[in-house]
Image (cartoon, grey):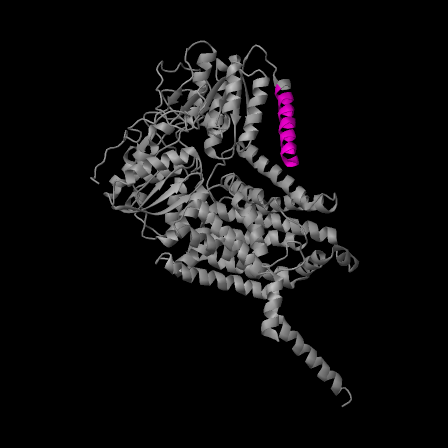
């Protein structure tokens, strides 16, 4: 009881301190006040997403229009709730955020909406209907990559599942989608399933452990962290196997590397794009500057999909001429390449993604008028709703082997 | 002729000491953890036929190597009755500095690698100074250092540590030398040198003395302040070294690299039979603890059960191991076997 009260007091104090800090920081009163709320910053994905938002806010004409402040609150939902509360009280007009929980933040989000705050969630989502969710989650990462792996394996073989964070709704959606495909093929045998926390190094050690028990694995289905799985295979010997994973630069380079292909690597790179943060920010700014009229909705960001034969090296600082990977001398292996989008975010360059600085000479370009509505996903982007019957239908790849 | 009785007494006394020595709890703990690890590896054949092989043992050594190195430093600090919560951040710092200062070229690795370890050592020394001269409790002091170092690493890299690992570190982690993995040779050498440093040098002996009673050690002429600062510095250097190894292992750095070694480093020390209050324990037993924890992880990973149950089993086995490896258990054993 006392403990709980202490904790509550602590939260209140924290909120008060933050309100004070936020209030004194507001200098330009005529600018639109937008807050960027991160739960955690410390991996390439999160920092790239935050960096592109900062870069866009500093790109003309937004540099004169918006006053953007970043708040990193940690991995507890209650800390993010406190951060939101402070932002609302400090007079935020918009909050762009990577939400740590799909449900825990709902009450605060609702309170903010009632005060006229726009909430834009990127990548992860909330089920509160007054917030805008901008995410690829509903675009079918799990089922499409699973089918691609099944195709590469000819419908049979022993596979590993390298999953994300236990208990996380995104990990569950991906894995459910993948299992809906794997279950159709009796020849596919999941011999090991482990949580890699969307982290390269954890993926590497967990895959190494699984390989100790199953050195004869035929394929790996991985969520983010996939480059670690390749490293683990290479540590073990010269044999690589077909695998699917997300958008790390190291994985894409490996997919296109003739030596790695000869060793047995084939597959597809898809998954979570940090570019959603930039897209969400521009949408929000268009609404706040009265250039767009859009009611709160769930917006689907297209699933990046790059099979091995479509990997193309970029010569410059951005995705140009259909290129989609950078030389290993320019970015680290863990760099998430899908931070760019030539159509939606032409303003961005490597400098924006890595340092949060605007591209010299770039100005904000208007977004296409249409947005894609995301299908309902109970527990992910809506609470009392039903998933469509064709929830796991394939959109990027066709089954080339019969079950 | 007259001195005969005293010579007899002397030999008797010697014999007595020899009879007790092999049953020192630390020695038993060390042997017990290794035996348990081997038994686990052999028994894991029942889990999967591919297990129980030399290959699996090699995997365990590679995965345990980081923990062994971190646990050495952690062990020194625990030995003097402290605790080092900054190891996770220092592991990360070592890896981040290796990839940003040196990168995938080998340029300047010869002097930059030692420089990185010196930076880590200085940070550790700062923790030590806080603990001794400023009187901040070790728990708080090292937590603060850890948070500061971790945040500096975040700011310095703006979230994305650039660059790959230096070739020399990749070679250390991955290359073979006459059919033997270099890393395994390195780990064995490290363990032997570290065990000698802790167990048989005046440096190590002084740490034991401080852990048993800082006041008594001071009276006996040990510079408690200097030794404490040194212990924290050694811990930071070990963590930094583990960071270098991790960078070589995964060819790059991430900002959460060290997180998974903080609690296991403490667990390895304690599972190895050292008292969390300081003054007892041996590094050989800590190595055993690290190997046992890693073996356990490998075998449990192969069980193919849900994540929840996996963690429950892991936690339970660690608890049982701790209870079994307690000093009172050895005292009981000694009573059973010895008399």
Q: Main secondary structure of the magenta part?
A: helix
Q: Quadrant of the C terminus of chain A?
A: top left
- In the displayed orientation, state which residue is furthest to the bottom: B1
Q: Is residue A124 left or right of residue A32?
A: left
In the rendered image, residue A325, in percent from the top left (x then y), is placed at 37, 32
Q: Is residue A120 left or right of residue B324?
A: left
Residue A358 appears anywhere in the view: no
Residue B214 position (above or below residue B143)? below
Q: In which quarter of the image is the N terminus of chain A?
A: top right
Residue B67 position (above or below residue A395)? below
Q: How many marks?
A: 0
Nearer-the-camera pick, A394 or B167: A394
Residue A120 position (above or below residue A159)? above
Q: In this view, does A188 lie to the left or right of B21?
A: left
Residue bounds of the magenta highlight: A1-22
Residue A18 included in the magenta stretch of the image: yes
In the rendered image, residue B260, in percent from the top left (x then y), is placed at 52, 45
Residue A341 position (above or below residue A335)? above
Residue A334 appears anywhere in the view: yes
Give the residue displayed 50% in from the left and 19% down from the top. Answer: A110
In the rendered image, residue A249, in percent from the top left (x then y), is placed at 39, 35
Nearer-the-camera pick, B228 or B336: B336
């Amino acid at each position: 009881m006392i403990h709980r009260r202490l904790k509550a007091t602590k939260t209140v104090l924290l909120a008060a301190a933050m309100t004070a800090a936020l209030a004194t920081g507001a200098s330009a009163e005529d600018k639109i006040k937008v807050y960027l709320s991160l739960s955690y910053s410390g991996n390439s994905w999160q920092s790239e997403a935050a960096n592109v938002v900062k870069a866009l806010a500093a790109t003309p004409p937004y540099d004169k229009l918006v006053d953007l402040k970043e708040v990193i609150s940690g991995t507890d939902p209650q800390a993010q709730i406190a951060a939101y509360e402070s932002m609302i009280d400090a007079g935020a007009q918009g909050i762009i955020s990577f939400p740590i929980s799909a449900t825990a933040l709902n009450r605060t989000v609702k309170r903010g909406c009632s005060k006229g705050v726009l909430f834009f969630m990127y990548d992860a989502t909330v089920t509160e209907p007054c917030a805008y969710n901008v995410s690829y989650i509903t675009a079918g990462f799990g089922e499409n990559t699973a089918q691609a792996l099944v195709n590469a394996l000819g419908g049979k073989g022993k596979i590993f599942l390298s999953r994300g964070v236990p208990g996380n709704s995104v990990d569950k959606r991906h894995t459910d989608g993948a299992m809906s495909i794997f279950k159709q093929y009796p020849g596919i045998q999941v011999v090991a399933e482990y949580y890699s926390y969307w982290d390269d190094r954890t993926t590497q050690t967990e895959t190494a452990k699984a390989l100790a028990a199953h050195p004869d694995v035929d394929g790996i289905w991985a969520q983010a962290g996939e480059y670690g799985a390749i490293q683990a295979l290479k540590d073990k010997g010269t044999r690589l196997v077909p695998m699917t994973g997300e958008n790390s630069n190291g994985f894409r380079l490996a997919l296109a590397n003739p030596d790695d292909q000869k060793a047995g690597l084939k597959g597809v790179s898809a998954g979570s794009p940090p570019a959603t943060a930039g897209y969400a920010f521009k949408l929000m700014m268009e609404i706040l500057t009265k250039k767009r009229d859009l009611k709160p909705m769930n917006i689907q960001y297209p699933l990046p999909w790059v099979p091995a034969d479509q990997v193309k090296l970029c010569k410059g600082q951005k995705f140009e001429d259909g290129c989609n990977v950078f030389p290993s001398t320019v970015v680290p292996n863990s760099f998430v390449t899908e931070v760019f989008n030539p159509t939606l975010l032409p303003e961005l360059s490597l400098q924006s993604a890595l340092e949060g600085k605007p591209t010299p000479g770039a100005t904000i370009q208007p977004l296409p008028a249409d947005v894609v509505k995301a299908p309902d996903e109970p527990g992910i982007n809506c609470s009392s709703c039903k998933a469509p019957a064709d929830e796991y239908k394939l959109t990027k790849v066709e089954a080339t082997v019969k079950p | 002729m007259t001195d005969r009785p005293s010579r007899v007494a002397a030999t008797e006394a010697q014999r007595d000491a020899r009879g007790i020595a092999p049953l020192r709890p630390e020695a038993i703990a060390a042997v017990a953890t290794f035996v348990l690890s081997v038994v686990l590896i052999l028994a894991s054949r029942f889990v999967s036929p591919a297990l129980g092989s030399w290959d699996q043992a090699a995997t365990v050594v590679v995965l345990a190597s980081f923990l062994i190195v971190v646990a050495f430093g952690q062990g020194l600090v625990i030995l003097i009755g402290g605790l080092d919560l900054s190891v996770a951040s220092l592991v990360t710092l070592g890896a981040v500095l290796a990839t940003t200062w040196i990168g995938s070229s080998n340029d300047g690795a010869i002097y930059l690698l030692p420089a990185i370890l010196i930076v880590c050592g200085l940070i550790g020394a700062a923790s030590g100074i806080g603990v001794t001269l400023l009187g901040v409790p070790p728990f708080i002091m090292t937590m603060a250092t850890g948070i500061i170092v971790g945040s500096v690493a975040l700011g310095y890299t703006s979230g994305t540590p650039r660059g790959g690992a230096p070739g020399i570190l990749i070679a250390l982690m991955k290359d073979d030398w006459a059919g033997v993995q270099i890393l395994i040779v390195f780990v064995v050498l490290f363990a032997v040198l570290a065990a000698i440093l802790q167990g048989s040098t005046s440096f190590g002996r002084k740490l034991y003395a401080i852990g048993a009673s800082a006041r008594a050690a001071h009276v006996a002429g040990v510079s408690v302040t200097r030794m404490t600062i040194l212990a924290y510095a050694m811990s930071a250097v070990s963590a930094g070294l583990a960071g270098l190894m991790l960078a070589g292992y995964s060819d790059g750095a991430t900002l959460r690299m060290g997180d998974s070694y903080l609690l296991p480093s403490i667990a390895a020390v304690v599972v190895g039979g050292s008292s969390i209050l300081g003054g007892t324990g041996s590094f050989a037993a800590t190595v055993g603890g690290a190997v046992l924890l890693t073996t356990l992880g490998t075998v449990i990973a192969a069980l193919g059960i849900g994540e929840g149950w996996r963690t429950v089993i892991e936690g339970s086995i660690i608890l049982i191991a701790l209870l079994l490896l307690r000093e009172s258990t050895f005292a009981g054993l000694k009573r059973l076997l010895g008399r």
